[in-house]
Each structure stands twice: as C-alpha cells, then as structure tokens.
Image (cartoon, rainbow, N blue to C red):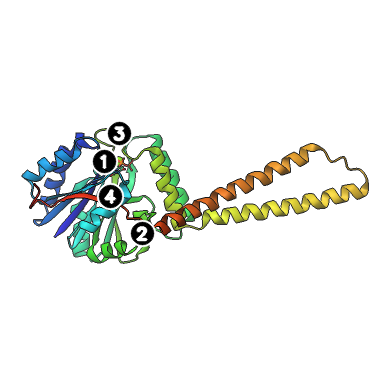
Amino acid sequence: MLSIVIPIYNEVGLIDNLVKRTVSALETFVTEYELIFVDDGSEDKSLQSLINWQKEYPCIKILSLSKNFGHQAAFTAGLEYASGEIVGMMDGDLQDPPELFKEMYRKIQEENFDIISGKRSGRKGKSSRNFYTFLFHLLFKNVAVIQNMENTGNFSMMKREAVDAILKMKEKVRYLPGLRAFIGFKQGYVEYIREERIEGDPKMSLSKLFILAADAIFSFSRFPIRLTLSLGLIGTIVFMCAGIYVLVAKMAGFAIIGWSSTLLSIYFLGSIQLVSLGVVGEYVYRIYKESQNRPLYFVKKFYDGKNNE
Ligand code: UDP
Ligand code: MG
C-alpha cells in the first residue's frame, strides 16, 4: 500500500482542490493507497471539510492534533500513523505537484531506490520568501555535515525501511529533509518546478521559516560554534598586537592613548562576546528542549474512516 502524508493548517480554501487533484493523480498508477491528512490544529473549517471528503473517499484518514505543533511535527505524526510499505510526503498547498508521485513511485519500484526527493529546479514567482529560501540553501550547502540535499524539501517518497529509520530518530528539534538525507539508503531525485500557492497565504510565517532554518543549521552543522571560536581567536590575536603596540608606544614615550582606541576595543570585544553568548544560548536551548523530552505532538482524534462517530 502507498500512504501519502499531508499536513494541513488553515487551508480550508484549497482542500477541495487538493483532495480531487491528489486522488486523481494517485489513481493513474496505484489502486491501494491512503491519504493521511494531519490537521495541525486548524482554527478554520479545514477539519470539517476533510471529514466531509472522507465520506466520499474512505481512503482518507485524518489525524487531528490537539493544537498547532508546527509542520515538522505534523509530518512526523503523519509518518507515525502511515501504514503503507511506501510513504509519500507532500505539503497541503499544492506547491508540490501530486502528479510527480507517479515518477517517484516508478523509480522506487523499478530502479530500486529507497528514497526519492523532489528537487526544485526552479520556483515560480519572485517573492522575498523565495530569496530567503535560496540564501538558506546556499548557506546550508556550505556548512552542513550532510550533502546533496540542496533544493530539496519535505516533498518525497520513501520505502518503509527509510521511514522507520527516520522515526527512530527521536530528537525534538527536527528538520526532516536533513534527517532524510542523514539516514543513508539509496537516494534519488525527481526534478520539478515549485508552483506558487494556489490559494491563501503561506501558513509558515517568516518567523517560523527562520526558526526552521536555524534548526536545520544548528542540528546539521558545527558552523555556528566554529564561527564563534574563530571570532574569539581573531579577537585575541588583534588584541595581542594592540597590546604590543601600546607597550612599545609607552616605552618610546610618544603615546597619547586616546579614548577612541579604548572605546573601539570595548565595542569589538563586547559584540564578539554577545554574539558568542547568543550562539551558545541556541545550543543550550536545544539541549534543554531535548532533555525535557516532551512528546512532539498530541492527538485529539484519529479518524480512520471506520468508526468515526
Ligand atoms: N502547515 C502546518 N502547520 C503549520 C504551518 C504549516 O501543518 O504550523 C502546513 C500547511 O498547511 C501546508 C504545509 O504545512 O500544507 C506547508 O506550509 P506553507 O505552505 O505555509 O510553507 P512553505 O510552502 O512556505 O514552506
Ligand atoms: Mg507552501
């Protein structure tokens, strides 16, 4: 069986389109499948709309979370509830075309891949958001310890073994595209142009997007802490030189050591220390999150299409 996991947060305006397009895309190549919609605490009528659709398509299952936990948690919840031998992941705003699952499925079945990710060869639209995503991938490519995941996101399909491997990693601060690249297995790509949202505003606010980028960088690279160390070292060297200069100037008797140099050094050292504290703080915060060991999400109800009322 094929499972497709789709997180939904306040998407009532496009659910009709989403269900119809996904169902007709899947029916071209597979007979047995389930659609797992994870309602990530929507405040609009998304859940109601999904329940209505379930009456028409019993292959729809709905996991209703107790509040908004964020889309990485929602995807994780969906993966945990998916029972298919092959599992696909897709955003619920149709920016990832469901028609591409056919090619992903073929590659897994015929070319023996374990994981196929959607690689964005381009993006429609010229929003600042696309620019931030571009910057993130540029930075991530250069600093991360895992490679070959440039321009891939959540859109993907995996064999059961790979899904189980991802689910074995219990970290609370999660960046699924990173975890997917990290686990190994035979990985391949399908290229596509990322569409613009067909309706509504992005549900990942810019601040959520930046937090996700920070999570990705902090959990898959040593860059921030290395940068801090390098800044500290540079600071030390600069101040050793300055120290020698001051001593020489004093001994030579021509020193009027003005306030500007004092002030500059205070600013310089102060800012390096503040930045370093911030970086260390980011790590401490993440360690704290992990040690709390709270569940990633809570389920309010699972509508499995059998005994819903
Ligand atoms: N989403 C979610 N929880 C959230 C934010 C978003 O489940 O807290 C869902 C959203 O409904 C959509 C998908 O995650 O199906 C991707 O969200 P969005 O399009 O806002 O992200 P972007 O395309 O900007 O990465
Ligand atoms: Mg989107």
Task: Quote the CA–CA distance across marks 3 and 2.
Answer: 27 Å
Name which of mark 3 and mark 2 comes first in the sequence: 2
Q: Is mark 2 within 8 Å of ligand 1?
A: no
Q: Nearer the viewer, residue 280 or 166?
A: 280
Q: Are marks 3 and 4 in contact (CB under 8 Å)?
A: no
Residue bearing the label numbered 1: 9
Q: Percent from the top left, x then y, of residue 36?
A: 18, 51
Q: Quadrant of residue 3?
A: bottom left
Closer to the eye: label 1 or 2: 1
Task: Please give the residue where the numbered disc 2 appears in the rendered image.
Answer: 179
Mark 4: few/some/many CA within 10 Å (<14, 14-19, 20+): many
Q: Is the CB of the residue bearing disc 4 within 8 angstroms of ligand 1?
A: yes
- Residue 159 placement, left or right of 258: left
Identify the residue under disc 3: 201
Which mark is drawn over residue 74?
4
In depth, the one of 141 and 268 nearer the eye is 268
Question: What amino acid is found at the position of numbered circle 4 in the picture?
Answer: Ala
Name the N-terminal-most of marks 3 and 4. 4
Q: In the displayed structure, does residue 123 sit left or right of residue 90? A: right
Q: Quadrant of residue 146?
A: bottom left
As measured in the structure, the alpha-carbon distance from the residue carrying label 3 to the one carrying label 4 is: 19 Å
- Contact, CB < 8 Å: mark 1 with mark 4? yes
Of labels 1 and 2, earlier in sequence is 1
The reply to whether the residue tagged 3 has its Cβ within 8 angstroms of ligand 1 is yes
The crowd level at tag 2 (other Cα within 10 Å; few <14, some 14-19, many 20+) is some
Assess mark 1: CB under 8 A from ligand 1?
yes
